[in-house]
Image: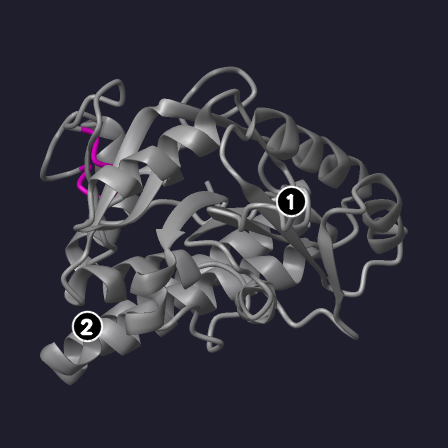
Amino acid sequence: MNPRPPLVSAIVVSFNVRDLLVDCLRAFYACSDVPVEAVVVDNASVDGSPEMVAREFPEAKVLRLPGNVGFGRANNAGLQHAEGRFVLLLNPDVTVMPGCVGRLADFLLIRPDVGAVGPRLQRPDGSLDLAARRGFPTPTAAFYRFSGLSRLFPDSQRFNRYNLGHLPPTEPHEIDAGSAACLMVRRSAIDRVGFFDPDYFMYGEDLDLCYRLKTGGWKIFYLPTARAVHLKGASTRQESVRMLFEFHRAMWTFHYKHYAADLPAFANGLVWASIWGRWAALALRAQIAGDRRVSR
């Protein structure tokens, strides 16, 4: 008798994070109360990650890439091997809590209008990972964030639109975008709007995907009854200088792709200068202070 086909396919992209990957997969398999499969895409790790997965999780599919092709391209490769009706984007530094996968899947089952749903993604201290629920980074929203106004007025719908500070994190609600660290996407929606844009190497892929889902008529939701813990930054700290560059390149790529055509050249030039001026300031700070954080 053939086993039940998976309802959920988790795609996990790894890069030299073997120990975190073990914990991630153990939690995924232990806490999944629906038929699941895991597709692990390894970006040419040298720490024995693929061998560990083959040994400890023989039921998982392992795809070994010859080089580090980036987050989006690796997920695109993994999608070709995913058989589930729903695709769970799952970072190796994320641990899903009991019931998380099932609750996300149930939400998509009862809401055919929803293209993606994300859990309450939280840090180890219990605080909300702000990337779990976001508005789109319009030029105005980005200005409020990078000028510090969003921090001064964290509950303001106007000044903290990017992190949706006016909405209670304890209640489910519609959002513009979740985080690809842990986000469940309907496969039929992906088939309609496409998966990750390979123009992004790291960062921005999830915002771009969610933007295309919403313009394609799908809704995106935040579901706090589903929970996951995000350590954050385990892979990016290995190449922090490059990742800081890619973080800002992703900002410009998103803006150029979705907003630039509707703005005058002067406004686009101002956005470009603001993004790369911020990159230069943070790169200098990193050199002086040894601050290895990529996003804040």
Q: Which secondary structure dominates the residues rendered in magenta?
A: loop
Q: Is residue 47 above or below residue 253?
A: above
- Residue 199 falls within the magenta-colored stretch: no
In magenta stretch: residue 162: yes
Taking 98 as reference, is 176 above or below it? below
Q: Secondary structure at mark 1?
A: loop
Q: Which residue is mark 2?
A: 259
At 63% from the left and 41% from the top, the residue drawn is 291
Q: Which residues are magenta?
A: 160-165
Discs 2, 1 touching: Cβ within 8 Å:
no
Q: Looking at the picture, tell me which residue is in the foreground, 108 or 264.
A: 108
Q: Residue at x 20, y 21 (%)?
A: 168
Q: Which residue is label 1 attached to?
A: 292
How many numbered badges does the structure rendering display? 2
Q: Residues within 10 Å of mark 2 (few under 14, many from 20)?
A: some
Residue 249 at least partly seen: yes
Q: In which quarter of the view is residue 207 placed?
A: bottom left
Q: Is residue 109 left or right of residue 74?
A: left
